[in-house]
Image (cartoon, rainbow, N blue to C red):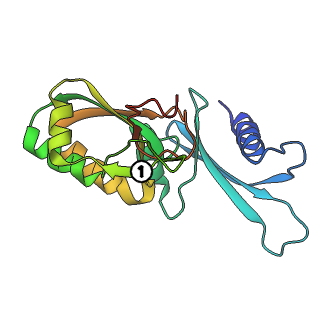
């Protein structure tokens, strides 16, 4: 992928994100060629503002996948997050093998994995997240591979936890983008009563 293609992908990505690609006047601020990725910074050209707004993203040169920039993180951190599998903050984490069960549980507790069990009360369906306990994580890890779906990780806060997991070699994992089936559900949906079906 050449630089000009990366710029067009970034413009389309942000145009689609804001829902007005044809009306969005985007200028190129900066394009950085890094390893197998392009980092593209665009500016919204708006004469009513003194300072132009910047939009940044990272684009995989091979797959053309896009990840929106994470503020307050270096390019190296964002590259690490992209290589881990982050494209957005909501991901599925699949555990494939375990070398050390106790360490695995402790490290997964540090990620604050969550689930949601919808409850009906006063004709309102409540979707309140709960955090998996050590015992619940242990139960899940008994049947590998296991997947903790729809987990929300603020990349700027959790990259260190993922670095620790990799260094520990306690378990192997992969991340993939969650399918957002239900809006405003943050955590694995466990719909025992079929309230959202």
31 on left or right of 169: right
Left or right: where does residue 131 sit relative to residue 133?
right
* Above or below, 168 relative to 44: above
Of 124 and 138, the residue lying toward us = 124
Residue identified by numbered label 1: 153
- Residue at image x 38%, y 41%? 117
Q: Is residue 169 visible?
A: no
Residue 61 point in image, percent of width and height: 58, 32
At x 36%, y 55%, the residue is 158
Q: Check the image and name the residue furthest to the bottom.
A: 50
**Would you identify the image quadrant in which residue 52 lies?**
bottom right
Residue shown at the point (89%, 42%) measured from the top left = 22
* Residue 40 as seen in the image, left or right of residue 89: right
Q: Is residue 63 above or below residue 48?
A: above
The x, y position of residue 130, in whole percent, is 33, 51
x and y, in percent, of residue 53 in the image? 74, 64
Q: Position of residue 193 (x, y in %)?
A: 41, 31
How many tags in the picture?
1
Query: Does dot 1 land on a helix, a strand or a loop?
Result: loop
Residue occupying the far front of the picture: 122
Question: Label 1: few (<14), some or many (≥20) within 10 Å?
Answer: some
Q: Note whether residue 132 is visible.
A: yes
Residue plotted at (21% across, 32% down): 140
Foreground of the two, 88 or 147: 147
Give whichever of 191, 157 is nearer the camera. 191
Q: Nearer the viewer, residue 78 or 157?
A: 157
Q: Quadrant where the N terminus lies?
A: top right
Left or right: where 85 falls relative to 169? right
């Amino acid at each position: 992928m050449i630089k000009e293609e990366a710029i067009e992908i970034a413009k389309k990505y942000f145009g689609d994100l804001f829902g007005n690609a044809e009306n969005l006047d985007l200028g190129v601020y900066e394009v950085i060629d890094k390893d197998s990725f392009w980092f593209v910074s665009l500016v919204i050209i708006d004469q009513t503002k003194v300072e132009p707004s910047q939009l940044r993203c990272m684009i995989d040169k091979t797959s053309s996948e896009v990840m929106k920039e994470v503020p307050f993180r270096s390019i190296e951190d964002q590259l690490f997050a992209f290589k881990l599998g982050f494209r957005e903050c909501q991901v599925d984490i699949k555990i494939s093998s375990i070398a050390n069960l106790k360490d695995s549980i402790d490290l997964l507790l540090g990620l604050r994995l969550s689930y949601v069990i919808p409850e009906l009360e006063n004709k309102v369906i409540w979707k309140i997240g709960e955090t998996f306990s050590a015992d619940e994580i242990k139960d899940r890890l008994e049947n590998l591979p296991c997947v903790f779906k729809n987990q929300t990780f603020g990349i700027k806060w959790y990259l260190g936890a993922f670095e620790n997991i990799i260094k520990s070699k306690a378990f192997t994992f992969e991340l993939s983008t969650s399918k957002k089936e239900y809006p405003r559900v943050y955590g694995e949906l466990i719909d025992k009563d079929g309230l959202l079906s």
